[in-house]
């Protein structure tokens, strides 16, 4: 059948009932750069349709698993049935490195109130209080975070009241999250709820000063497979002090101290842009989007940071680090590119990686032929310039928007509007902006929001890409069709993939996957269905 993306789009959705067909038709677009500089409008951040088999996760996953979970000394208690805790236990590869063996690290634990029918009927607040007291006695943490699961919202337990009471009783920071799984349409709502909590209950609580000249926070970096370790090393060698990572390899104190930095750099826009915005309003810290996925992208991001600080010595050191790292990158890239050039990739990941990883494929000559987010919003696809025109629907209204005003004592504009304008004019450095995925893609490529399983199968059959990037839920279904599937959430137990050393790892891993002969020996299940039927009948 035709591989024309417009024809394929119709093919993907023709099986659906009329109403769903219309909806999916708005969630699937073909890229184009229009004369006025715009890209096509996509429908995103709306509910998944029942029965469609989405890749998405829930709001609780976005709050507990993604944003707060990676902070090693905040003790997480899940208020809900045991399954919610068990299935979130050690399932994301956010690594952490305590300074010593005596330092608290709760990441391996799985704490739950283990709600039973009795608690559903008579309420679970008493059980939650007992759990908080018990956890405090056992672990003596600085902070305890309480996460609500679906039944908590349904029966109306007030986790915030419990948190306030326990905070007063125990004398440590205790805070709760109304992040019931159903609260939003996806993980994305959980990110927003977590951002609000981090801002309200953590940032600004630690006034430790730092003498360093160049102080930044790294937002939206979760240290999957050790990515954060690679970036910490690069920044340190450049002489840039990272006050707080949000939240890979972080602690309560580092995040509480974040307001002392002079710049926020944002890796994953989707999961943490709210914190960046709120910190600018309250403390006067500007933010800019960076990307450390891809060697060239990493070099560009480092140069942007150096330009922001307008320091000749820093710029020199940054150039030195880039030069040191690039030699090894180029050596591997030349070998891998010769073997991978012209091959094709599809990327369907959460909210950032489907964009960022296109860069790594481009660097080895591979072409992205379809991409999409599980839960990205229109600004992640089209750029933040669409934000003023976005309609806020009932599902988004469900999530609190914090009113943020300048802190009367601690607000200090790190740069004047004139300095910002000058920096923006000097290079392509933009503040408070994210251009989005589509403007950086080639024309005539399929972009699909909240890809369904049916669409995945049809895409694979029609295009037969050399590699499909997604998660564990998709992986084995895809590989049974004879196509290697790279997990871009967990990295298939590999990585790190960030920065320069990460790029080398990625190039080598992709080379192995796309050039492995074994895939050509796999017969897709539908071609063997008859054979199986005969065997079964015998
Ligand atoms: Fe940001 Fe992430 Fe992502 Fe994300 Fe995620 Fe993740 Fe992801 Mo999985 S924070 S949006 S909610 S970059 S866990 S580290 S890989 S879906 S693309």
Image (cartoon, grey):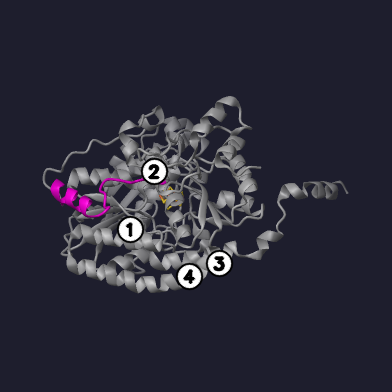
Q: Where 180 sits versus 259, above or below? A: above
Q: Earlier in the sequence, mark 3 or mark 2?
A: 3
- Residue in view at x 27 percent, y 51 percent: 288
At horizontal 47% and vertical 67% (from top left) the residue drawn is: 505
The span shown in magenta is 415-437
Mark 4, Cα crowd under 10 Å, few <14 / some 14-19 / many 20+, is: few
Magenta run includes residue 420? yes
- Under 8 Å from ligand 1: the CB of mark 1? no
Q: Which residue is under mark 2?
A: 380
Q: Nearer the viewer, mark 1 or mark 4?
A: 4
The residue that disc 4 covers is 334
Q: Position of residue 192 (x, y in %)?
A: 35, 41
Q: Which residue is mark 3?
A: 339
Q: Tell me whether circle 3 and circle 1 mark residues in contact (CB < 8 Å).
A: no
Q: Is residue 530 left or right of residue 509?
A: right
Q: Nearer the viewer, residue 496 or 446?
A: 446
Q: Name above or below for residue 49 compared with residue 409.
A: above
Q: CA distance from mark 1 to mark 4?
A: 36 Å
- Secondary structure under tag 3 reads helix
Task: Residue 354 in the image: state x and y as whole percent.
Answer: 46, 50
Mark positioned earlier in the residue sequence (2 or 1): 1
Dividing the picture into quadrants, the one containing residue 142 is bottom left
> Would the CB of label 3 be found within 8 Å of ligand 1?
no
Of helix, strand and loop, which one carries label 1? loop
Residue receiving disc 1: 250
234 with respect to 414 (left or right)? right
């Amino acid at each position: 059948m035709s591989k024309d993306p417009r024809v394929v789009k119709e093919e993907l959705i023709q099986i659906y009932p009329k109403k769903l067909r219309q909806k999916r038709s708005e969630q699937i677009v073909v890229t184009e750069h229009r004369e006025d500089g715009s890209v096509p409008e996509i429908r995103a951040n709306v509910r998944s349709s029942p029965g469609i088999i989405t890749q998405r996760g829930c709001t609780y996953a976005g709050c507990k698993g993604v944003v707060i979970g990676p902070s090693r000394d905040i003790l997480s208690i899940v208020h809900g049935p045991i399954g919610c805790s068990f299935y979130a236990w050690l399932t994301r590869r956010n690594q952490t490195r305590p300074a010593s063996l005596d330092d608290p690290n709760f990441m391996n634990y799985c704490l739950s109130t283990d709600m039973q029918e009795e608690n559903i009927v008579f309420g679970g607040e008493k059980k939650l209080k007992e759990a908080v007291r018990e956890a405090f006695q056992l672990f003596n943490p600085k902070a305890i975070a309480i996460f609500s699961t679906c039944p908590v919202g349904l029966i109306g337990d007030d986790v915030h009241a419990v948190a306030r009471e326990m905070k007063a009783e125990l004398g440590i920071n205790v805070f709760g999250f109304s992040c019931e799984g159903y609260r939003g349409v996806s993980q994305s709502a959980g990110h927003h709820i977590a951002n609000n909590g981090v801002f309200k209950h953590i940032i600004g609580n630690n006034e430790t000063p730092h003498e360093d000249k160049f102080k930044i926070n790294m937002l939206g970096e979760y240290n999957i497979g050790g990515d954060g370790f690679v970036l910490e090393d690069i920044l340190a060698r450049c002489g840039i002090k990272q006050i707080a990572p949000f939240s890979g390899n972080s602690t309560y104190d580092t995040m509480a101290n974040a307001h002392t930095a002079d710049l926020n750099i944002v890796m994953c826009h989707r999961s943490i842009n709210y914190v960046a915005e709120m910190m600018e309003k309250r403390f006067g810290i500007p933010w800019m989007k960076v990307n450390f996925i891809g060697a060239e992208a990493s070099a560009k991001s480092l140069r942007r940071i150096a330009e922001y600080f307008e320091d000749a010595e820093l710029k020199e050191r940054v150039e030195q680090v880039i030069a040191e790292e690039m030699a090894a990158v180029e050596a591997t890239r030349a070998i891998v590119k010769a073997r991978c050039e012209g091959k094709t990739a599809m990327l369907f990941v959460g909210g950032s990686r489907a964009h960022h990883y296109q860069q790594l494929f481009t660097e080895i000559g591979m072409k992205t032929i379809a991409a999409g987010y599980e839960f990205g919003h229109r600004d992640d696809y089209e750029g933040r310039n669409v934000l003023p025109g976005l309609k806020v629907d009932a599902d988004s209204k469900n999530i609190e928007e914090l009113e943020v005003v300048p802190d009367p004592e601690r607000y200090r504009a790190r740069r004047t509007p004139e300095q910002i304008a000058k920096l923006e004019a000097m290079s392509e450095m933009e503040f408070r902006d994210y251009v989005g995925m589509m403007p950086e893609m080639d024309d005539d490529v399929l972009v699909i929001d909240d890809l369904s399983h049916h669409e995945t199968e049809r895409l694979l059959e029609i295009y037969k890409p050399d590699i499909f990037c997604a998660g564990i839920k998709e992986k084995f279904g895809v590989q049974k069709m004879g196509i290697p599937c790279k997990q871009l959430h967990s990295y298939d137990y590999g990585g790190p993939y960030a920065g320069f050393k990460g790029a080398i790892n990625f190039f080598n891993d992709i080379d192995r996957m796309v050039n492995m002969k074994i895939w050509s020996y796999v017969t897709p299940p539908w071609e063997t269905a008859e054979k199986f039927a005969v065997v079964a009948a015998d």
